[in-house]
Amino acid sequence: MNREIAVVAFVQTRHAADSGGLSEVEMLAPVITEIKERTGVHRFGFTCSGSCDYLEGKPFAFVTALDAVGAWPPISESHVEMDAAWALYEAYVRLLHGDVDTALVYGFGKSSQADVRKVMTAQLDPYYLAPLGPDQVSLAALQARAYLERAGAKEDDLRAVAARSRAAGRDNPYALHLEDPDGSQGYDVAPLRPYDIAPDTDGAAAIVLAAGDKARELCERPAWITGIDHRADAHGLGVRDLSRSESARIAGERAGAAGVEVAELHAQFSHEELILREALGLGDDVLVNPSGGALSANPIMAAGLIRIGEAAARVQDGTAAKALGHASSGPCLQQNLVCVLEGEPRG
Amino acid sequence: MGNPCAVIGVGQTAYKTKRLDVSMAGLLREAAQRALEDAGLDWADIDAVVIGKAPDLFEGMMMPEAYLADALGARGKPMMRVHTAGSVGGSTAIVAAGLIQSGVHDRVLTVAWEKQSESNATWALTVDSPHSTSLVVGAGGYFAPHIRAYMRRSGAPDHIGTLVAVKDRQNALKNPYAHLKIPGISREMVESTPMLWEPIRYLETCPSSDGACAMVLASESAARSAPNPPAWVQGTSMRSEPIFFAGRDNVLPQGGRDAAADVYRQAGITDPRRELDCAEVYVPFSWYEPMWLENLGFCGEGEGWKLTEAGATALDGDIPWNPSGGVLSSNPIGASGMIRFAEAALQVRGMAGEHQVDGARRALGHAYGGGAQFFALWIVGSDKP
């Protein structure tokens, strides 16, 4: 199947460290309403979402979210228990079939309801790793150390990533507005300091995909998806080179990452951006995370989708001819998705 | 619908209360290995892996695709995890088929499972949450009032559920993978078991099972070199509707009707009872057979119980339902939908063994989930669409 598919609209919440008493449905509903108004589309050919039961502490987070979508009459719909970037991938594949022209994709997460770094332990090998209780930040610190030693980078390089991300985030009305990193702060888990770690964030985001002429009808300058691919690495931290991301490298090559002007990377720790830049072959001329990235706002399950939305926004506003959105899942960048967007369809 | 897609491999584990001999990875690998053998393929031949299961709280493992990547040979490959409640086994197969139909891949491995012995599903279904009240009833308590409403609406006599419970367990005796095998199963035996959620008796419910089911799906060119006959996907459909709102028909949900109409249209079916040779339908409580007979258009409204009573859905009836023994005989929750889809494929491949429906050429696979609000259906046939 060969079909032109584009991001035609992207909406996100003004992300917050704590959205207070809002339920997930209340957080999501304005986003869905806005994207329907903006596109003028109220029934989509396909709908797909990403969310995580463990953030809510109960099963079926996605069931109540349907109340925000308006699934009546019944809709053609699916859900991944992954970042919504993978829901976008599923919707993209669905549009390739040729029988539907529009898809709604959304993701949401309320980190404030949970202790994220502990919750993430529940995604580790349940027999040999999870019972030992390593938390997300400790595992990330292992990866950071492996990278610094292999690449000869310094902790100052990590702080530079955090400083640039936070400065950009302060210019982004949707991100948290965080102060310049304070180099005198102690370690959280060495070599990571608090500013190297993405902030707990509540938020939601939605994207509308459309195919061919429908995309042109809904959007003046669609951001065409010219390549999208995702790959997994082994789970066992001891059987992969933690200082590199082989899965991101393959996904980037297959999606056609070469030549992008802007890259939105789902780096939840400073060192992850450096590993991903290397894996994706992004030179110094590539503008990375002009939105501030996950280090400025990291609503889990939506943060990867937001990267694609932000990259698409750069294409739509004409500031980039070719941009890349990246999403990650699993401990230490285990899974990576790369979506390349361009202003004009290829060929 | 896109490019042709075929099921060229099916693998199942034995379904049991506790599979203490294997880890979760071991359980999935057992099913996947059997599917690969059926397809005449090795791990390296697979382009992508799509897995599915019911809520992560069932085993206490969050986002299990991360841990399972190693055991399922997904290193360096795309891997996804689908979750759409009880319909997930069906939805997962549909997402995997989509990767073939879109032309993205040629050979996709899809696996669904549950290992209920690792945790407690009824507990996971009844935990409290900050924003809604827990019903503390499990699935049976939730569906019993809907069954009672069906009985009142249709005027069905009380013994219909018993007939389904007996029929599916008789079929299970012919299925080597089935969990519940009850020699001499009879109406008296079912009626002598305790009432759990009026009108559902103990033997009218599904068991709690450990198990996994896998399929290898292939493009037309990849299917050509398969050693065993393929089952061609002739239609797929998913529908979702909100769980609670005034006026929603809980007994015969619109989503089920719409999904059925969609999949029949794709397969060119106008009379499912006549044009399908058998069906594997998600019946976790016995009464859902007559209810789904109506919802899926095998008869008119209020008529489903009459088909069951007349034996139309028995293995020797005109439209056998659940020749494998169905969910009533094996219920690894997340896998139960995929087992329906896979058993439908086995029937049209002529590989269902002792529970084979003679000459089956077209079969329906069905799954539902949540508060009977998520539906996934496919039709497979021996002929390429």
Image (cartoon, coloured by chain):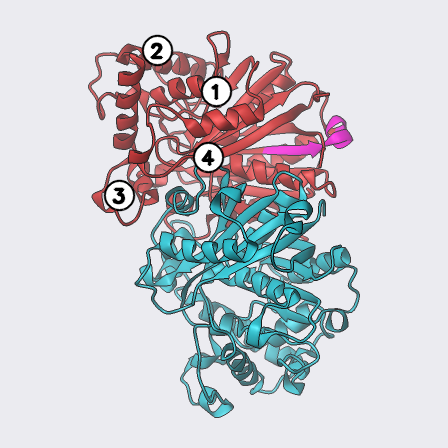
Chain colours: A red, B cyan
Question: In the rendered structure, which amino acid carries the disc numbered 3?
Answer: Leu
Q: Residue A201: where, in percent of width, then height?
A: 39, 31
Amino acid type, mark 4: Gly
Q: Is residue A217 above or below residue B326?
A: above
Q: Quadrant of the C terminus of chain B?
A: bottom right
Residue at horizontal 53 percent and vertical 75 percent from the top? B325
| Crowd rating for badge 1 (residues with CA inside 10 Å; few <14, some 14–19, many 20+) | many
Q: Which of pointers 4 and 3 indicates the residue nearer the eye?
A: 4
| Image spot of residue B345 (x, y percent) | 62, 62
Q: Which residue is mark 1?
A: A280
Do the CB atoms of the residues marked 4 and 2 lie less than 8 Å apart? no
- When the figure is inspected, residue A325 is found, relative to residue B354, above or below; the finding is above
- Marked residue chain, label 2: A
Chain assignment, label 4: B
Work out whether disc 4 and disc 2 sit on a shared chain: no
Label 2 sits on residue: A160
Q: Provide the residue designation for mark 4.
A: B76
